[in-house]
Image (cartoon, rainbow, N blue to C red):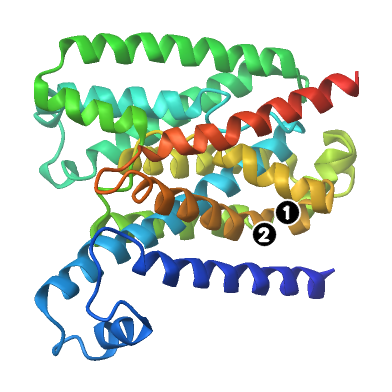
Amino acid sequence: MQRRLTVYLVLLLILLLLLSIGSLFIGVYQFEGNDFRAIYDLIFKNQSVNTSDYYVFYNIRLPRIVLAILIGSGLAVSGTCLQGMFKNPLASPDLIGITSGAVLFAAVTIVLGSTIKAYIPEGLHYSLLSIMSFIGALITMSFVYKMSTVDGRTNIVVLLLSGVAITALTGAATGLLIYLSTEEELRDLTFWTLGSLAGANWTKNLIMAIVILISFSFLINKGKALNAMMLGEKDAEHLGIPVERIKRRIVIFSALTVGTAVAFAGTIGFVGLIVPYILRLIFKSNYYLILPLSAVLGSILLLTADTISRTIVAPSEVPIGILTAIMGAPVFIAILIRFKKSL
């Protein structure tokens, strides 16, 4: 099984590399030559290229591609872990309210940030948006988990209804903040609600990479534990799996990943739903394979969506959250149809 996993990972990584290189060439601005030699010169002979090529390559396209890879990977792994923990394919950060909770706290920071910053150390001002988004994601995740789980068993109806309630409540609160916001704050809030990677830079990439590394160090190797939990939490405990500790880690690090992603790119829905669903069609419910593969497939999905979003109506761009919703809605309907047939 390890050999099989390695083969699939290598193939997906090659595909991701090819997509990344292709994405560098796609856009309104065309590099001199617009071929692989141009990219080679930018990487290895950056002193001899013109300043426009250098700026677009290092400050616009490359940071955006890296951020798409990081956020896509984080959202996919979070969604996969949540589905394994809840033992249901409908559990994903956006459908159970985690994303909307993170967006609400990001909106609070945007509109009331000047008031909040007066009470916190100056060193945390730059990270305030990420911290608040994480807090919002953590609170909503904890609420949904406690509401839908009784005696170690998760009620899927309560899970979805809790997500609907959280989304409606946070949506109303976000709407109130939009009403109270200034014109500049309204533009920022629109960015969060529609989602975009246009604000990518190397500082955000560094923070997101650190978050991903920390989260993945606790989550990416939990495939066998999630497989055991699929048999039932009591049976998993008899096999020596620390069920409660794993569930706490999934809650905390999923919230951390989703909160940071929302802080940097706004609402990007359905990635955590689409990726596990595609992999489950191929590998059934074997999380030992699905979990690490989701990290790469999530990057591929979001990078593809972002490349389309910035080229389909060039020189403008379609908010990436709209594209992922268009891709995710049919998958969600397909899951519901399969779930209906299994009743």
Q: Is residue 16 left or right of residue 321?
A: right
| Tag 2 secondary structure | helix
Q: Is residue 267 left or right of residue 8?
A: left
Above or below, 91 against 265 in this view is above
Q: Is residue 7 left or right of residue 68?
A: right
Where is residue 150? Give x, y as percent. Answer: 74, 17
Say few, some or many: other residues with alpha carbon within 10 Å of mark 1 (under 14 / 14 to 19 / 20 or more).
many
The foreground one among 172 and 247 is 172
- On residue 290, the disc is 1
Say few, some or many: other residues with alpha carbon within 10 Å of mark 2 (under 14 / 14 to 19 / 20 or more).
many
Where is residue 113? Give x, y as percent. Answer: 15, 27
Q: Is residue 170 left or right of residue 150?
A: left
Above or below, 176 against 226 in this view is above
Where is residue 90? Give x, y as percent. Answer: 69, 28
Residue type at numbered disc 1: Ile
Residue 237 visible (yes or no):
no
Residue name at image x 46 percent, y 24 percent: 139
Q: Residue 21 occupies which quadrant of the picture?
A: bottom left
- On residue 342, the disc is none
Q: Quadrant of the N terminus?
A: bottom right
Q: Pointer 1 and pointer 2: residues touching (CB < 8 Å)?
A: yes
Q: Residue 261 occupies which quadrant of the picture?
A: top left
